[in-house]
Structure formats: C-alpha cells, structure tokens
Image (cartoon, rainbow, N blue to C red):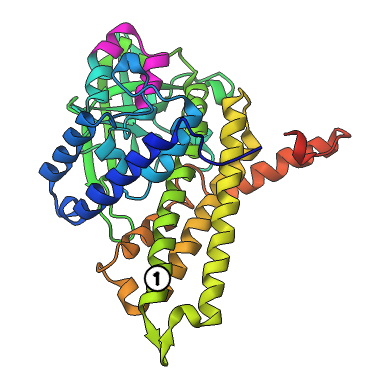
Amino acid sequence: MSFAVPDRVRPLRDAVYAFMTERVEPAERAIEEGGREALRELQEEAKKEGLWALGHPKELGGGGLPFLDYVYVNEVQGRSEYGQLALGTYTLQDSLMLYEHGTAEQRERYLAPLVRAEISPSFAMTEPAVSSSDPTQIATRAVLDGDEWVVSGHKWFTTGASQAAYTTVMCRTEEDAPPHLAFSMILVPTDTPGYTIVRETPVLGLNGSHCEVRYEDVRVPAANLLGPRGHGFVIAQKRLGPGRIFHCMRWLGQAQRAFDLMCRRLHERTAFGEPLAKKQLMRQHVFDSYAEIQAARLLTLQAAEAVDAGGGARVEIGAIKVVGARMLHNVIDRAIQVHGAAGLTPDTPLDRMYRHARAGRIYDGPDEVHIDSVGRRILGEYAGGGNWEFGLR
C-alpha cells in the first residue's frame, strides 16, 4: 500500500503547486489589502490554464476530479488561504450540496453562477446563544405560512455573508420530531427584507467576513427548502465529512509551507558563529514537525480512502480533525520560534497562518467533541464484545 501521489495526479498537482507558489503566494499581500482585481486576475489565469474548480463535476463546468484525486491536489492548494478563491474551489461543498439536493429551479438560479465564481454562497449554523458542539439546540426557527417560510433567529460566524448572494440557513422546522429530524435547510437570498448583517466579527484580529446575522421574520418562498423537510442534519453530514478531509489536506499544505520556511531559515540564520541548522534544539524542531506532518498526512489519506470506498469513516474523520489542527498549530509555532521576532511580524506569512491555525481547533466542531465521539465509538466496539483492529478498518 502506498500513500505516494499517484502518477495520474502528479502532473496536475505539480501545475497547481507552481500556480500557488509562483502566483498566488506573491499576490497575498495585495489581496489582503483589498485587491479584488488581483484575485480576479488569478481566477482568469486559472481558468485559462485548466486549473479551475478541479473538484466540481464536469457537467457543472468543473474539472471533474474523482474525490481521492482531488484530495491530493487540495494538499498543495492549501498553501495559501486564498488558494480556494483563486482556483474556484471555495464553492465546492455548496455546489455539491445544491447539485445533489437542490430542485431544478434552485440549481438553475445558483449552481452555474457558483461554479463560475460569479456569485458566492454562505452557510449559517452557529448561533451566539447556543453551544455549537450540540447543534440540536439551534434556536433559529422557520414556520410555513401559506406558500412562504418565515425565518426568525440569530446566527453568527456565517462566513462570507457580506459578499454572498444567498445563505443556506439551518433552522428548526419540525416541533415534534426526533432531534436529528427536526431541522431543515432553507435558502435565503441575502437581499431579502429582514436579513440584517449586524457586523463582521474579527477572528484574532483578522477580518475574514465572519458575519453575525439577524433573521427578523424573513419571508422566502416555500420552494426555497433544500431537500426534504427535517433532513437538514442528513444533508449537513454529507457536506461535513468530505469537507473535514479537505480542511485537513489544506492544513497539510500550510504545514508544508511553514516547514519550508523554518528549514530555510535554519540554514540562512547564524548564531554564535554557525548556522542555526547546526544547533541540536533546532534540529528537534525539524524532527517533531516532520513526524507530526507525516502522521497527520497518513491518517488523513487513510480517512479519505475509507470515504472513497463508501464508508462513513466517522472515527477516522473525527481523529484527523483533531490531529490535523494540532499539527498545524505546532508546526507553525515552531517556524515562528525559529524566525524569532520576525516571525511575529507581517514580514513572513507565519503570523496570519498562526492565527488561522488556532481557529481550526474550534470550527467544524471543537477538538473536545471529536475526541469524545471517537473515544465513545471505539469503546462501543468493546462494550459489544468486540475489539478495534486497526488493520481491518
């Protein structure tokens, strides 16, 4: 068994790597400072070079890469926080969700413009008054009034809402159903009366368009229901599993970039008459980072294989979400330490990477929830008289 990049994927992966290192990374500062034109130029270049929306189905105008092939490409795309936007993959999860569960009318209105990056989506689940680790407590409600849904509630961390054409809102629609069949997804155009963006919430000092939104008797057509009533969690689970694998692969790209910066710095910087690379403690930073990156990579690829084979992979996905986020934080932290004071400044990308990495231990489920879930599932095997054989999973 090999976890090497397959030969069929290598040329495309190399092309994406070159695009990221030669064009996206040098443009980061301009994009950070509001350079939408710089981003649009990158998007047009990606389209011309056949690198656009690689994970989207071909019938939607994407590259049509199979899941596991796209996982390998996602690894190098993740080197920059702007990789998804520049290469047209930011909309992948929303596009696939619409493609699988949307009506013909919903797909016609949103799907093609999403893939072309003419519009952007947003997704609303998290609420400020509710523990997001228990989404069955979501308080936002939608009531059917004739041929309209009336949505009322309060969400935050709706990423991209300020630029989005619509928000997919997770809300309670069924009062007497079991918890995981009580919620639905409803598509709400962001220009609908009653949809109010309260603020964009900075995260550790970074403005990432994480919006707080109030829904005050927002009325949308009944046809804006996505999928069957009460199936919001079913749809969300299909979205979140592969999405977490994509997160972890992008984190590996970030970790590789931080590792490269650290190792080069160790050769370039001298202290007490010799390069830092000669210092044993600095070599331990290299060793620890290598071991954590490699372990996280193999765990992630194994989880991706399990998903690709049709398995739920709940244990594998829960484990990599925790291991991957910790790995990324640790590797970037060591790279900053090696750079000293310079690592705390915008002179390198490490300061932004570090702040984004810390957030990874919270979004898409905090570490504690995944740890508890994985432990519970494994112990459940023993409670039933079985065991957990790693090689058979």
User: Is residue 99 magenta-colored?
Assistant: yes
Name the one closer to the observer, 243 or 70: 70
**Residue 129 seen by the camera:** no
Which quadrant, please, contains the N terminus?
Answer: top right
**Residue 245 seen by the camera:** yes
Q: Is residue 16 above or below residue 308?
A: below
Amino acid beneath label 1: Ile
- Name the residue: 50% across, 53% down: 325
- Name the residue: 22% across, 48% down: 23
Residue lying furthest right = 385
- Name the residue: 40% across, 71% down: 336
Q: Residue 202, position in %: x, y?
A: 28, 54
Which quadrant, please, contains the C terminus?
Answer: top right
Rate crowding at label 1 as few (under 14), some (14 to 19) or many (20 or more) other CA atoms within 10 Å.
many
Name the one closer to the observer, 144 or 256: 256
Name the one closer to the observer, 118 or 149: 118
Q: Which residue is mark 1?
A: 336
Left/right placement of residue 359 relative to residue 317 reads left
The quarter of the displayed image where residue 151 is located: top left
* SS at circle 1: helix
Q: Main secondary structure of the magenta part?
A: helix
Magenta-highlighted residues:
94-108
Q: Residue 279, position in %: x, y?
A: 51, 82
Left/right placement of residue 118 relative to residue 289 reads left
Left/right placement of residue 15 relative to residue 308 reads left
User: Is residue 167 magenta-colored?
Assistant: no
The quarter of the displayed image where residue 192 is located: top left
Q: Residue 21, position in %: x, y?
A: 29, 51
- Name the residue: 43% across, 43% down: 75
Q: Residue 113, position in %: x, y?
A: 22, 21
Q: Is residue 382 above or below residue 69?
A: below
State the count of labels.
Answer: 1
